[in-house]
Every structure is written in C-alpha cells, then in structure tokens.
Image (tube, grey):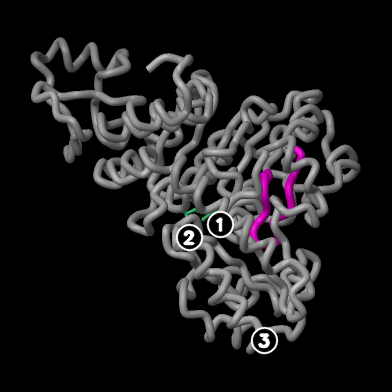
C-alpha cells in the first residue's frame, strides 16, 4: 500500500499478505516457526532476513507482520514491532534504549505500571529519573539536561486527561539529543499525529481501541526503521514478549473498523460531555474535546478531537461516585477503555489504588473521580441513563 492512500483505505488493505490460496480475510499463521528448503537457505536466513522471510515467531510471523505494517502505515511510522501487551511495548522501548547512568525525564501523571518500570525497575539498574508536571513546559525545560537520554510521557494522561504538548517537549528533548517516547493510548491511533509532531517512538496498548472489543491483550512500538530494527529489535526478540499470531489477527481485524468506532465513540463523548458539563452533582467534568478543558487550544492543534474518555469528579466524593456507578444501567464497571461497551472506573480504589493518598492528590485523582470510556451504544441512551444515575448520586 502506498503513501497516497487515505487512512481508512490503509486500515482495510495495508500490510495484507496472501498465501497461495488467495484468501480474502487475513490468514492466521498459527505457527511457531518456518521450514527452509535447504541447509544453505537456513544459513542464509540467519545471516540476513528479508522483509517476507521468517525464522521464529518470537522474532516475527506473517500475521503479526500484517498487523505491524498496517498500524505503521496509519501512524506514518517507518516500522513497527508488536508485543504481547501494552506494558511489554513500554518496557521494551525503555529497557532497550537505556543503560546505567542515563538520565530520563518523564511526566508524573502516568499509568501505574509505566511508573513501576521507571521508578522500580530502571532506577534499580542505575538510571536517573526526574519526574515533572507534564503540562508545565517550564518544568520540562528545567529538568532536561545535556546528558538526558530519553523523555517519556502519556500524550493524554490517565485518568485526569491532561494533555502534553508533543511538539514543544520534543523540541527541547531533541536539542540535547534525547529520544522522545510517547505512550499514545488516549490520543488513539485515529487522531494521533505524534510522529509528525516530533515523537521518535510511539507506543500503544492494542488492548484498548485497536482491539476495541475487549478480547485480547496486545501492544505495539512504532518508530524509524533504524530504531525498530536496532537494539530495540534485539532486546525484543531475545526477551520474548512477542504477540501471538491469533491476537495479532484480532488486532488486524480491529484496525479495519477502528476509524469508524473511534470517531463514533468520540462523537458520542462530545455529546455526553456537553450534557454533563455544569451538572449540579459534579465538581468537575474533564473532557479534552470540550471548550472548558484547560488545554483545549492545544488539543485542537495536537489531535483535533478529544477522544473517547471523559472523567467526572462527583462533588459528593467516593460515596456519591459509588452510588452513581451502582445506579448506571448502560455500561459496565470495569477497568479497560476504548471498548465497544462503555466502561466506568473508579480510579482511586482500583487502577490507582496502589498510589499513596498524597500521590493521588497531587495527580488530581480525587475520591469522587470516575473515568468513563464511552462505547458504541446510542449516545441518547447514555445521556439519559447517566444523568438519571447522577441525579440520584
Ligand atoms: C492500558 C495501558 C497500558 C498498558 O497496556 P496493557 O495492554 O494493559 O499492558 C499502558 N499505558 C496506558 C496509557 C494504558 O492505558
């Protein structure tokens, strides 16, 4: 598939490889390995592997390669490597790029497991870490040093939906030669312009919008050919967090519909944010696509749209939040996001319960905060159900 095709065309046809049967739907190559025609061919394959030559599924597999090529085309990246989960993607991108003595600057508002890799693993191996308030460019400026090797942040933070200026942070990082790694889950692959804006490496949990139907874990790392095929590939192939061909097939089929799903979910989120804004039971309604968002201008420049997640802060604290969650009929109480089903989460007692109260407070994760991942249900039903649940909270 060539550059000139539009994203939706690439999402349906990009990366397709057909077997000798010319199947319509992509084949699942459920195989760990590949046979060689001769001993010489085996030797040659280990010396240099061509783009459609495979050795072992830990290194690559045709179904996985179809998924990697398709998402790389959408993201505008030269190359991609798929991993067993989003966390494996984050871990591989960071571990493969850093060594003892390196300095890393990261935004403080991170998914708990990302924070674990930085604070508990990398620091243990001698990496120096500085955490900043990612929305404050002055803090990035003060923290990035001539010896900073890497910066890492979620382009939209979970669950308070703060948006980080990718272009501005990338410019500061590149001025000292640091690698910019962006966890882009909340921006979604549909609205992402991260590489164009300056990110060197983009990471997704495919578990979220890419699958979008709550079926499997997966992840992907995108970047230049040089990055993906270099130390990163060696680290990834030797440490083994490869994506299963079956899960790659789910993600591949997820990509066929991701544009339609994410746009419909975002449109619904816009309507719901409008309906919930200023509701008497709410201390705050946070939605990057709403004009009340603190960085609405940046959102317009960076992704154009606010995405599929809204956070609301109930004035009545945890009791009100629990009453609301228990009164909701449409949507489920769970902790995934980007799903066809609306998912409601109480971060303080679930996804962010391992943080201290002090940490939660500094991140704005109050007891009243509920994260809502808007699904594919009819938005009118969602507004009616959720406003009724709020009224009783
Ligand atoms: C879910 C998530 C991850 C981890 O992905 P898994 O597929 O669950 O391993 C990492 N970063 C962000 C921002 C996420 O939302």
Is the Cβ of the residue at disc 2 closer than 8 Å to that at disc 1? yes
The residue depicted at 52 percent of the width and 30 percent of the height is: 75
The part of the image, by quadrant, that contains residue 286 is: bottom right
The spot of residue 264 in percent (x, y) is 50, 50
Whether residue 316 can be seen here: yes
Circle 3 Cα neighbour tier, 10 Å, few/some/many (<14 / 14–19 / ≥20): many
Residue 290 or 39: which is nearer the viewer? 290
- Magenta highlight: main SS: loop
Q: How far apart in space, not on screen, are marks 3 and 2 (Cα)?
A: 23 Å
The residue singled out by tag 3 in the image is 320
Q: Which residue is mark 2?
A: 375
User: Mark 2 and mark 3 in contact (Cβ < 8 Å)?
Assistant: no
In this rendering, the label closer to the viewer, 3 or 2:
2
Report whether residue 126 is seen: no
The location of residue 90, given as percent across then percent down, is 54, 45
Q: Nearer the viewer, mark 2 or mark 1?
A: 1
Tell me the residue that label 1 is attached to. Answer: 268
Say which label, 3 or 2, has the lower sequence index: 3
What element does badge 2 sit on? loop
Q: Residue at x 31, y 13 (%)?
A: 48
Residue 70 inside the magenta-drawn segment = no
In this picture, residue 60 sits left or right of residue 185: left
User: What's the magenta region?
Assistant: 153-165
Q: Earlier in the sequence, mark 2 or mark 1?
A: 1
Q: Earlier in the sequence, mark 3 or mark 1?
A: 1
């Amino acid at each position: 598939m060539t550059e000139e095709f539009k994203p939706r065309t690439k999402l349906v046809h990009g990366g397709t490889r057909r077997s000798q049967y010319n199947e319509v739907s992509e084949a699942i190559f459920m195989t760990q390995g590949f046979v060689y025609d001769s001993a010489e061919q085996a030797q040659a394959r280990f010396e240099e592997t061509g783009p459609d030559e495979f050795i072992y599924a830990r290194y690559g597999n045709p179904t996985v390669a179809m998924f990697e090529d398709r998402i790389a085309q959408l993201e505008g990246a030269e190359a991609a490597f798929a991993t067993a989960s989003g966390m494996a993607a984050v871990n591989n991108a960071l571990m493969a790029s850093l060594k003892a003595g390196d300095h890393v600057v990261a935004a403080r508002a991170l998914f708990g497991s990302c924070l674990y890799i930085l604070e508990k693993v990398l620091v243990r191996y001698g990496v120096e870490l500085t955490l900043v308030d990612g929305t404050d460019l002055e803090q990035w400026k003060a923290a990035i040093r001539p010896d900073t090797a890497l910066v890492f942040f979620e382009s939209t933070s979970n669950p308070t939906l703060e948006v980080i200026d990718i272009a501005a942070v990338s410019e500061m990082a590149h001025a000292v030669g640091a690698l910019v790694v962006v966890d882009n889950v909340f921006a979604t692959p549909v609205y992402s312009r991260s590489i164009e804006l300056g990110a060197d490496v983009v990471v997704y949990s495919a578990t979220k919008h890419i699958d979008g139907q709550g079926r499997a874990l997966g992840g992907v790392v995108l970047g230049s050919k040089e990055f993906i095929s270099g130390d990163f590939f060696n680290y990834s192939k030797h440490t083994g967090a490869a994506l299963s061909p079956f899960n790659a097939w789910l993600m591949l089929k997820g990509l066929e519909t991701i544009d339609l799903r994410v746009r419909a979910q975002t449109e619904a989120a816009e309507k719901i944010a409008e309906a919930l804004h200023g509701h008497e039971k709410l201390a705050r309604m946070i939605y990057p696509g709403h004009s009340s968002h603190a960085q609405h201008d940046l959102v317009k420049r960076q992704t154009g749209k606010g995405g599929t997640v809204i956070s609301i802060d109930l004035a009545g604290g945890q009791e009100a939040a629990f009453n609301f969650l228990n009164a909701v009929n449409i949507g489920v109480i769970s902790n995934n996001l980007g799903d066809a089903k609306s998912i409601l989460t109480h971060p303080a007692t679930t996804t962010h319960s391992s943080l201290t109260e002090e940490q939660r407070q500094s991140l704005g994760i109050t007891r009243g905060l509920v994260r809502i991942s808007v699904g594919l249900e009819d938005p009118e039903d969602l507004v009616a159900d959720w406003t009724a649940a709020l009224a009783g909270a």
